[in-house]
Image: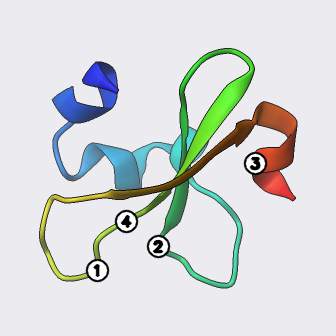
Amino acid sequence: MATFQALTIAEPYADKDLYLQSADPRMRTIRVTDNWRGIVLAPDDGSDTFLLVNVVPHHDAYT
């Protein structure tokens, strides 16, 4: 989480590894460990606050 918090607001949008294919383009994933990913909702209002929605096993993050 410290690594994610250190990013500028533009960096999560530019990093292809943080993008999650979904019906909502604001959904992103972040690596928690090698085996776990966090599902986050990215802001669409210009703010820098992301909402952690869930933490799931790496392989489940994309289903």
In the structure shown, which secondary structural element does the residue marked by tag 1 occupy?
A: loop
- Earlier in the chain: of badge 1 and badge 2, it is 2
Q: Are marks 4 and 3 in contact (CB under 8 Å)?
A: no
Quadrant of the image occupied by residue 31: top right
Mark 2 is on which residue type? Arg
Distance between mark 1 and mark 4 Cα atoms: 7 Å
What residue is at 53 percent from the left and 45 percent from the top? 18
Residue marked by disc 4? 42
Distance between mark 3 and mark 2 Cα atoms: 15 Å
In the structure shown, which secondary structural element does the residue marked by tag 3 occupy?
A: helix
Distance between mark 4 and mark 3 Cα atoms: 16 Å
- Earlier in the chain: of badge 4 and badge 3, it is 4
Residue marked by disc 3? 61
In the structure shown, which secondary structural element does the residue marked by tag 2 occupy?
A: loop
* Nearest-to-viewer mark from 3 and 2: 3
**Total number of numbered labels?**
4
**Which labelled disc corresponds to residue 26?**
2
Residue marked by disc 1? 44
Q: Is residue 29 above or below residue 41?
A: above
